Image (cartoon, helix red, strand yellow):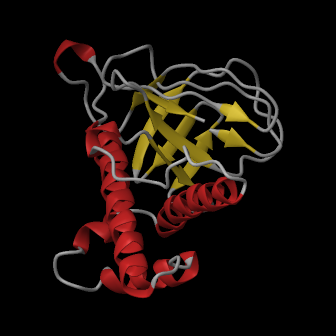
Amino acid sequence: MRFCEAHVSLEIGSKIRSGHSGGQCQGHAKNIPVQDLSQPPAAGGLPKVANLHRLVNLHGRLHNHCIALHKRFYGLFGKHLNQFALMKHITKLKTIEGFEWLGLMDAQAIQDSIQRIEKGYALFFSEREKGNKKIRPPSFRKINKARSFTLKQTGWKLVQDNIIRVDGRTYKFALSRPIEGTVKTVTIKRDAVGDFWVA
């Protein structure tokens, strides 16, 4: 988890291929294991983290949809799509048939994903102005290679020092040291082998 005023290390359960999470703070943090307490263990005793995979994949799908909208807007009007206009558009899409999947994600997490893309375009334009021709704008990516999403004020709750609830499911993690201060945001990360970390 990313802590604004805390210095902590977190990880989900013991190190499991299916998933775990790790913690990070404003200063420095390391990673540690987490276990899904919301469901019984799967075969072999591994915790089920299908819901975390689903959420990360949804944010990968959102990323690609936003990139498509950016490209379409530039093609039509020859200018950059404002992030706030995009946020309003995504909010309206939630009520349209075929876009129900947008309602499965936390609203502030959606905003954060859009802001990440905005930062990517800002860097692209800035570097191009400096004459850097090698830099490329944000692009499409394979959904199964999506890596993370960030929850801000909603969508998560620190139930106890070593238990966190994400999207209605409860996960247990081990602390490397006590949490100090107030946890502000939580980033769920999926690594290349499918393990989960909280930062």
Residue 90 showing in the rendered view: no
Which percent across, then down, holds residue 139? 40, 53
Observer-nearest residue: 148 or 180?
148
Observer-nearest residue: 71 or 115?
71
Q: Quadrant of the C terminus?
A: top right
Which percent across, then down, holds residue 56? 37, 46
Residue 177 showing in the rendered view: yes
**Which residue is drawn at the image coordinates 69% and 60% (left, top)?**
129
Which percent across, then down, holds residue 25? 74, 35
Q: Quadrant of the N terminus?
A: top right
Instruction: Give the quadrant of residue 171.
Output: top left
Instruction: Tell me if residue 46 comes above or below residue 159 in the rendering.
Output: above
Observer-nearest residue: 144 or 34?
144
Give the side of residue 34 with respect to residue 182, left or right: left
Give the side of residue 143 with respect to residue 7, left or right: left
Instruction: Tell me if residue 37 comes above or below residue 182 in the rendering.
Output: above
Give the side of residue 101 with respect to residue 38, left or right: left
Instruction: Give the quadrant of residue 72.
Output: bottom left
**Which residue is drawn at the image coordinates 16% and 18% (left, top)?**
43
Instruction: Tell me if residue 21 comes above or below residue 84 in the rendering.
Output: above
Which percent across, then down, holds residue 88? 47, 84
